[in-house]
Structures are given as structure tokens and as C-alpha cells.
Image (tube, grey):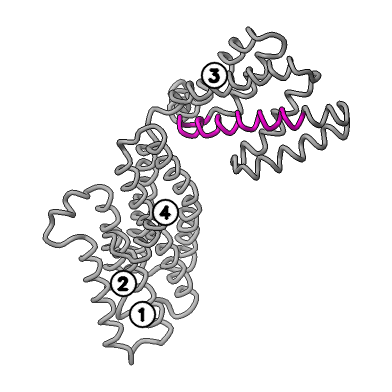
Amino acid sequence: MFARISEAFKSRALWLRQIGVASLSGATAWAIGNQLGTNGGVVAAIVSTLTIRISLHRSLREGIGQILGTVIGAGVALVSVKVFDFGFIAVALTIFFCAILARALRLGTIASVNVPVVAMIIIGPGLSESSVLHRLEATFIGAAVAIIFSYFSHPKTPIDRTYEFLNKLVLQGASLLAEMSEGVASGYNQEVAGHWLARARALVRKLPELRMQIGDAKGYTRWIRIGQRDEAEKASLDSLAVEHTLVQIRVIVRTLFDASLVAGIAEIARKETAVALSAASYALTAHIEDPEEIIGAKQSPTQDLRDATDALTKILVANNAKVENAQIVKGLSIVSNLEIIADSLDYTSPALNDEVEGA
């Protein structure tokens, strides 16, 4: 029992650390804000809780948005209450114009929601210039405390977190390719292909999170660690290569799934297809685990992948009279997808370079 409890805590250690830091941040903001007078601590604690994020960069960005939003919210609230008194119309106009101004200033989705929330916190207990000033000060305190405490929310930098997540996706993609290789070699069925397809789709659904991680890494080196910009750009390039690769893996799995519904993989090219998929799995793993060995090797894993796809192409073309047209089409589709994977992993894909230049 104790072992299970210990394991549960270990598996949630990062989450526990984050909520612990957030709790300390809110309590500290409350303690400091209480020195300002009535409701100062409550406002500071609320703003701290709304602002704190997983990294210093995110909290800094969110904190600036909160401060700008608070100034906007206070201004709109003052005007609304002065003109219409505190009531139904003033509340409605405050929320409406705060949302519009936050969107116009591109404060972000979360800050855009928080601006009217903070505005209502400011005008809720009653509006006067002195009380507004106190609540603005409390907002600044809450945002500042959250920014400081966010430094301790995660033990790793955004760049380290990007590579950690990237490596996880790569190993999952490589594992899926290896299973597909074994399945093709031994003869897979529709049910097995359906499981592959579900896993491939799950991997692709994680790509928006990867893009968000890259955004954090770039922002981190733009705002805080300027000297690590090259590392962030390298992480961005690696993430694009992996993103392209995972998308192609999903397409390959879909092709194998469709093939299982009709004629299947051409028997004469079964071995070469399995070898090509295995080569792709190794190339993907080596891209992350042994990058230095790839540079110094006489022939890179991506070249091995190209050789395998070339062998698959030749056997399909040479035996086109013995193979159904649908099987040839699906086989050549797999070849095309694997070649795109090879181009992405060695950074020769024109699409990859265009995205980097446009970033």
C-alpha cells in the first residue's frame, strides 16, 4: 500500500510542485497585499493565481497582460460607473469593452478573459479613486509575486522541456514504426491496423503542445536567456522535422489500414516494405539518441532508409504485371511518405526550410 502511495506521489511530483508553488505565490501575494488595506490581499492573491504559469517566460508574458488588462479594466470601470452609476448597465459595458480592448491589444486568450474578471474585482466592493488605486497596486503585487515564484514551478528550462517532450514523441513514433514493420512482415489484419491508426492519430494530436513548447523556448531566449537563442532555433528545427515525420507516419498507417480492407500489401514486396519501415524506425531513433554518430558515420540512417525505399520501388515496378494496381499505388505511396521522413530527418526537405525561414 505504501509503495503504491509513494509511486502515486512520484508520478505526480511535477504537478504537486506546481500547485505547491502556486499556493505559496498566492499566500505571499495575499500577505503583501494585506498591507495595502481592505481587500488588497484578496485581489493580490486572485491575480497571482490567474497569472502564475509553468515557466518564468509564460508568467512574465501573462503578468504583463494582467497589468495592462487591469489598467484597461479600471479605466473602463471608472467611466462606466461615472456615467451610468454602479448597476446592470455599468457591469455589462465593463465586461463588453474590456473583452474588446483585450482582444484588440492581443493580450492572449487567458488574459482576454481575465481582464473583465479583474475589472469586476476592482469595481465590485464599491468604486472610488482611492479604492481603485489600492486594487491596482494589489494587482501589480499579485502579478509581480507570480512572476517571481514561477521561476520555481519547473526544474527545467523551456528548451529542456521541449527536448524532453520531443524525445518522448520520437520514441513513440519509432516504436510504432517498428511494430508496423513486424506486422507487415508477419501479416497484419484490420484490427491491428486500427490500433496503429489510433496511436498515430494520438501522436499527431500532441503536435499543438509541441508547437506551444517551441513558442515558450523562443520566448524564453528572447526575454530571459538571450545567449541561448541558437539552442532555441535548433530545437525549433528539430521539432519541425519530427512534426513532419509524425504526420507522414499517420499517412503510412492510414495506407496500411486501407490496404487491410482490400488486397493487402503485395506479397512479393512484403519483405522490402517491412525493411523500409524498420529503417525508418531506426532513422527516427538515431536522430534523437545518436546525433553525433550520424554526423561521423560513412552512411547515415536516413541514407539507409532511402536505400530501403529504393529497393521497395524497384521490386514494385519490376513486378507490376504480377501485382494489383491498388497494391502498387499503396506501395508507392508508402515509399513517398518514407522519403519525406528521410528528407525531414536530415533537414533537406524544402518545406522544412521554408517554414524555418517564415518563422
Image quadrant in which the C terminus is located: bottom left
- The magenta region covers 53-77
| Amino acid type for the residue under numbered disc 2 | Thr
> Residue at the location (35% across, 73% down)?
336
| Amino acid type for the residue under numbered disc 3 | Ser
Q: Are marks 2 and 3 in contact (CB under 8 Å)?
A: no
* Residue that numbered label 3 is attached to: 25
| Amino acid type for the residue under numbered disc 1 | Ala
Residue 69: within the magenta? Answer: yes
Q: Secondary structure at mark 2?
A: helix
Q: Is residue 53 shown left or right of residue 128?
A: left
* Residue that numbered label 1 is attached to: 266
Residue ranking furthest to the bottom: 321
Instruction: Find residue 304 and name its label.
Output: none
Q: Nearer the viewer, residue 325 or 95?
A: 95
Front: mark 3 or 4: 4
Instruction: Find residue 273 and name its label.
Output: 2
Q: Where 15 sits versus 334, above or below?
A: above
Looking at marks 4 and 1 on the same chain, the residue that comes earlier in the sequence is marked by 1
> Residue at the location (62% across, 42% down)?
105
| Amino acid type for the residue under numbered disc 4 | Ala
